[in-house]
Amino acid sequence: MEHNLRNLLPEDGIVEYYGQVFDASLNEKYFQALLEEVSWEHDVAIIFGKRIVTKRKVAWYGSQDFSYTYSKNTKKALPWTKTLEELLEIVQTETGASFNSCLLNLYHNGQEGVSWHSDGEKELEKEGTIASLSFGAQRRFCFKHKKTKEKVEVSLESGSLLTMKGATQEFWQHCLPTTKKVHTPRISLTFRTINNPT
């Protein structure tokens, strides 16, 4: 599919929004398959020295059982499911990038989100592409420049694809703000490349 891509960021990084890459029936098919097939569990984060269990659920899959540490919490990748393999192939074809892992998030409603952060973990390929695929509820996704504090936001539709690459993680933070207006779930899949998996 041809996409008229433009960089959403004014400087210091590249964020491209592809819009919807699936139609409504495929959106629903993949959403249901992911809900049922994925080994969802509550995420754990260490915040100000306290162990916090999040309301949202997460899962970590990959081509090998490599480890990934964020928020002082380490996960071991599970082997790809059939649905994830299908989606991996589609995302690689659409973006022209290759990925070896995927972090999934399940937000039950708009009152679950993610605060400002960058995906700068040492395991990730430096300046590599991260591709984010969304299914379910439409949600706002925001970027904030670390120095200038300039903000950019995009509304992520069900079945849509967004990529972050280049210096984006070095200069920008991103978040999924909470909202009381959304009452249905959203699943995000963030395809990544882990360096030198052991």
Image (cartoon, rainbow, N blue to C red):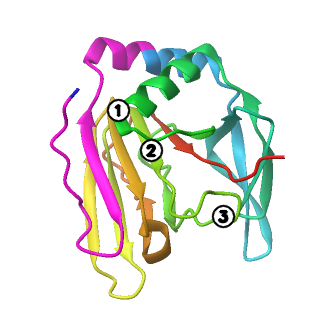
| Residue 96 drawn above or below residue 148 | above
- Element on which disc 1 rests: helix
Does any portion of residue 48 appear in the rendered image?
A: yes
Residue 15: image quadrant is bottom left
For discs 1 and 3, the disc positioned in front in the rendered view: 1
First to last magenta residue range: 2-29
Question: Between marks 1 and 3, how big is the CA–CA gap?
Answer: 25 Å
x, y (%) of residue 39? 71, 27
- Side of 133 where 62 appears, left or right: right
Q: Is residue 21 magenta?
A: yes
Amino acid type shown at disc 3: Glu
User: Which residue bears the numbered disc 1?
Assistant: 94
x, y (%) of residue 139? 33, 46
- Element on which disc 2 rests: strand
x, y (%) of residue 129? 47, 52
Residue at the spot x=36%, y=68% of the render?
13
User: Which residue bears the numbered disc 2?
Assistant: 131
Amino acid type shown at disc 1: Glu
Q: Would you say the residues marked 2 and 1 are in contact, meaning their CB atoms lie under 8 Å apart?
A: yes
Question: Between marks 3 and 2, how big is the CA–CA gap?
Answer: 16 Å
Pointer 3 or 2: first along the chain: 3
Q: Quadrant of the N terminus?
A: top left
Point out which mark residue 121 bears.
3
Residue situated in front as seen by the camera: 136 or 121:
121
Residue at the spot x=52%, y=39% of the render?
98
x, y (%) of residue 3? 19, 37
- Element on which disc 3 rests: loop
Amino acid type shown at disc 2: Ala
- Side of 150 where 124 appears, left or right: right
Q: Would you say the residues marked 1 and 3 are in contact, meaning their CB atoms lie under 8 Å apart?
A: no
| Residue 17 drawn above or below residue 61 | below
